[in-house]
Amino acid sequence: MSAFRRVVSGLFVTLACVGAPSAQSAELLVGNKSADTVWRLSLRDGRRIGEHRTGEAPHEIAVAPDGRLAVVTNYGGSKSGNTLSVLDLVGGKPTRTIDLGQHSAPHGIRFLADGRRVLVTTEASASLVVVDVASGDVERSIDVGGGTGHMLALSPDGQVAYLTKIQAGTISRIDLATGTRVERPAGKGAEGVAMRPDGAEVWVTNREDGTLTVHDPRTLAVKRRMSSKGFPIRVAFSADGALAFVTNARAATLAVFNARTKVPVATVPLSREDMAYQPTMLGNAALPIGVVVAADRPRAYVAISGGDRIAVIDTQRWQVIDYWVTGREPDALGIIAD
């Protein structure tokens, strides 16, 4: 057995579901960083239909291709965490914990193409680790070089990983077969990263610069630099790749771009004067962070971290049509399709 295999079953307990969620109903998964939980919300009306306990400070969520499992990175608080939480989305089994050993402060996470392994950035060990979800084995560790790898994107074929380094302001390209790494400047505070679904471009949000950079996926050369003022922190694409959605944390807006022409399409305000906001890293503020876009309905969902809400955006009228209640400090989001 690998020295890295440390699977602890039942350390965290899946709470009883409200209304027993069905595998066929579309749901939004919400990671509540300050509550150590993942909530399951109905995409029909935002009703909470389930809750899972996680490790401390769940930061990112990856949903398995078949929708049966989700894996959560437990970043930790005053002490770096070193675990992943595996959530059974269908059978209702207790949360299972995978111990990453020396690889602490896990953050970005993506399922690989085989649907059985995840790729995880671990900031404290400056690594990119491949983890078999069923066995809990850390199969491989790739050194990502100086600086801390934060957010993560994958090429459509799952052969290449792209990761951002906030302090270095860079984007890295890592060939997963060989471990070969190329690193290039993006912008100050490079954080959010996403690959266009057709694999033609990699987009990075540079929060200190207030910019978006569009990179060639092979060379990482900057093809375009656009303005997105107000601490751009995440980027996500529509399923068809036509639109890019950017959360601007300080400005409390969702900026939408035509992904081909790079022309701004809309800016959606996300804060409300009648809503009280909790303390965040930017003060008492709305602090929108995570964003996901539905593939089967004209909706985008943004985690309002300082307001303990999800903003529901109509992507035809470009306006917020609802706010759904979450646990404390929502951040990571995932969608379970019908």
Image: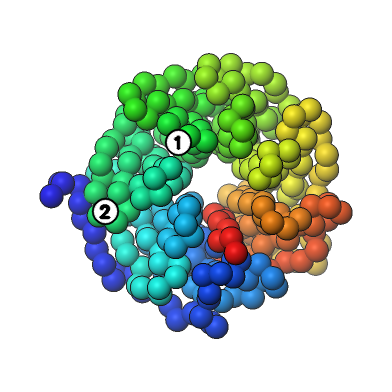
Residue type at mark 2: give it: Gly
Residue count near mark 1 (Cα–Cα under 10 Å), binned few <14, some 14–19, many ≥20: some
Q: Quadrant of residue 208?
A: top right
- Answer above or below: position of 27 versus 107: below
Please indicate whether residue 293 sits to the left or right of residue 74 in the image: right
Q: Which residue lies under the disc numbered 1?
A: 158
Q: Quadrant of residue 308?
A: bottom right
> Disc 2 on helix, strand or loop?
loop
Image location of residue 175, percent across then percent down: 40, 26
- Answer above or below: position of 296 versus 265: below
Image location of residue 194, percent across then percent down: 58, 37
Can I make out residue 190 in this image? yes
Residue type at mark 1: give it: Gly
- Answer above or below: position of 225 versus 237: above
Q: Report the residue at 70% width, 73% height from top.
A: 45
* Mark before the other along the chain sequence, 2 or 1: 2
Residue 136: mark? 2
Foreground mark, 2 or 1, reads 1
**Residue 94 or 58: which is nearer the viewer?**
94
Colouring of the image: rainbow
Query: Is disc 2 in contact with disc 1, using a CB cutoff of under 8 Å?
Result: no
Image location of residue 17, percent across then percent down: 49, 79
